[in-house]
């Protein structure tokens, strides 16, 4: 395969994805082209790749370029993981400027007012990448890891409905972190299906493979006690600070902390999570900081300290990008999908972001949804959920209008759609200051939002 990684100057993405690809015998012989606008960062990743290939004598070729169009000619697979500008400085503006105007958003990355501005900033360059793909490699698969996932996927597939564009998010992996402990069974013994919108999705089906028995009653019975005891981000950060060291991670999983070293803070970063379990009898597949971005009442119950502490920990972790290295193992699910495409296997992947159509009939057809999908050489066949729970569907529908208007704002450049997207947003409960807020954000982020008129 000819595989192009766009945004590969990021050590976490570039080196991590190379390690994933190198783990696959089916992908041996592939040429991987690294693309980034930061030539210095790009060369650092190239140097690491060259050294790894030489040391381990593996049959892959890695090259790099800042010329995206040259890299895309004849590509079979394009993987996108980009940000624009200074990620955390802009995130801070998305989060805090809206709060200054009285909008009570809990995270400001993917949902709420901050999520709208983030979408408006990052989606246009991804659309431009996809414009090039359609011209230079129209049969290529395109996998996107950038957020806000639903806004990006919705917008791209509205403009290019025939593009094999798939949004990828690793939040589904959270189920593997705790369900085996809750149910006291190996993860391999569980058949699971989740669906919804990205970062706003719930577990819908759970069965034990060995007996065929429904596991959901056991999850509902045992999950509350389990999460009462699990340490949260505030506990981990406090332990890290007290011991003057960073807590090691394995993939996206915290390694167990020594006995008695953390306070047992109830529902750390899962106080909102608990309310969904109580009132909807459904298990979210992510935590308060993500799920709470889409709910008007999240501010009341979310663990704000846990969310802030996670943000601090995450920001500090990415500041040590030089510590990332190539590891020949699977961190993400991309390679599993590529192998499924090669084999035309039809295996079921747990979470892909694709256009809805009729996959979740309760939701609009032209909004991207996150569902399981069967992987084939010619495309992905999403799993349909005709009986999606009505209560959760109502919450999802409340946010679909925001994604609709955000996509239209990107594709038309109309500022009025931005204002309307904010006024439709469940997190926004005011009207007078919204036009001023939009003008201020366009002024502050003119380099990326100046196309809005």
Image (cartoon, rainbow, N blue to C red):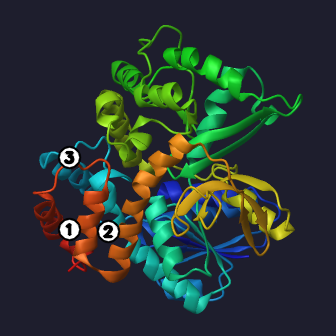
Label 3 or label 1, whichever comes before in sequence order: 3
Q: Quadrant of residue 390?
A: top right
Reading the image, the residue beneath label 3 is: 103
CA separation in Å, label 2 and label 1: 8 Å
Q: Is residue 371 visible?
A: yes
Disc 2 to disc 1: CB gap under 8 Å: yes
Q: Which mark is residue 121?
A: 2
Quarter of the C terminus within the rendering: bottom left
Q: Nearer the viewer, mark 3 or mark 1?
A: 3
Q: Quadrant of residue 106?
A: top left
Q: Is residue 131 left or right of residue 442?
A: right
Farthest-out residue, top: 260
Name which residue lies at 74% across and 28% down.
Answer: 215
Q: Is residue 8 visible?
A: no
| Above or below: residue 316 compared with residue 51 | above
Label 3 or label 2, whichever comes before in sequence order: 3
Farthest-out residue, bottom: 135
Name which residue lies at 59% across and 21% down.
Answer: 223
Q: Secondary structure at mark 2?
A: helix
CA separation in Å, label 3 and label 2: 20 Å
Residue 277 image position (x, y, % from top left): 53, 28
Q: Nearer the viewer, mark 3 or mark 2?
A: 3
Q: Which mark is residue 445?
A: 1
Q: Residues within 10 Å of mark 1 (few under 14, many from 20)?
A: some
Residue 13 image position (x, y, % from top left): 52, 58
Q: Residues within 10 Å of mark 2 (few under 14, many from 20)?
A: many
Q: Is residue 388 left or right of residue 348?
A: left
Name which residue lies at 15% across and 56% down.
Answer: 431
Residue 426 image position (x, y, % from top left): 32, 49
Name which residue lies at 34% across and 24% down.
Answer: 241
């Amino acid at each position: 395969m000819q595989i192009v990684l766009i945004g590969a100057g990021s050590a976490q993405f570039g080196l991590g994805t190379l390690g994933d690809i190198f783990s696959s015998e089916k992908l041996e012989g592939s040429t991987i082209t690294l693309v980034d606008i930061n030539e210095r960062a790009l060369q650092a990743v190239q140097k690491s790749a060259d050294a790894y290939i030489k040391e381990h004598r593996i049959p892959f070729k890695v090259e790099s370029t800042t010329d995206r169009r040259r890299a895309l000619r004849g590509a079979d697979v394009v993987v996108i993981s980009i940000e624009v500008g200074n990620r955390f400085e802009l995130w801070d503006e998305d989060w805090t400027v809206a709060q200054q105007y009285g909008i009570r958003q809990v995270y400001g990355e993917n949902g709420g007012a901050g999520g709208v501005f983030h979408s408006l900033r990052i989606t246009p360059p991804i659309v431009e990448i996809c414009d090039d793909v359609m011209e230079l490699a129209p049969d290529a698969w395109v996998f996107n890891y950038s957020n806000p996932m639903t806004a990006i996927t919705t917008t791209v597939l509205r403009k290019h409905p025939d593009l094999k564009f798939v949004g990828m998010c690793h939040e589904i992996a959270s189920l593997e972190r705790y369900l085996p402990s809750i149910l006291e069974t190996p993860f391999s013994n569980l058949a699971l299906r989740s669906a919804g919108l990205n970062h706003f999705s719930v577990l819908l089906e759970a069965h034990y493979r060995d007996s065929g028995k429904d596991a959901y009653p056991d999850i509902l019975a045992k999950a509350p006690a389990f999460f009462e005891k699990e340490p949260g981000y505030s506990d981990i950060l406090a332990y890290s600070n007290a011991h003057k060291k960073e807590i090691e991670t394995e993939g996206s999983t915290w390694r167990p902390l020594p006995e008695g070293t953390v306070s047992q803070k109830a529902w750390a970063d899962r106080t909102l999570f608990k309310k969904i379990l109580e009132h909807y009898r459904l298990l979210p597949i992510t935590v308060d900081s993500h799920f709470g971005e889409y709910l008007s009442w999240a501010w009341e119950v979310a663990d704000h300290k846990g969310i802030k502490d996670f943000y601090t920990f995450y920001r500090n972790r990415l500041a040590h990008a030089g510590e990332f290295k190539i590891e020949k193992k699977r961190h993400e699910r991309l390679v599993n999908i590529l192998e499924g495409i090669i084999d035309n296997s039809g295996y079921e992947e747990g979470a892909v972001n694709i256009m809805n159509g009729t996959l979740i009939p309760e939701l609009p057809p032209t909004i991207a949804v996150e569902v399981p999908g069967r992987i084939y050489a010619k495309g992905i066949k999403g799993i349909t959920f005709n009986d999606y729970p009505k209560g959760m569907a109502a919450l999802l529908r409340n946010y679909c209008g925001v994604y609709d208007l955000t996509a239209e704002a990107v594709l038309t450049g109309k500022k009025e759609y931005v204002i309307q997207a904010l006024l439709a947003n469940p997190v926004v409960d005011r009207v007078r200051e919204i036009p001023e807020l939009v003008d201020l954000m366009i002024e502050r982020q003119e380099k990326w939002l100046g196309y809005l008129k």
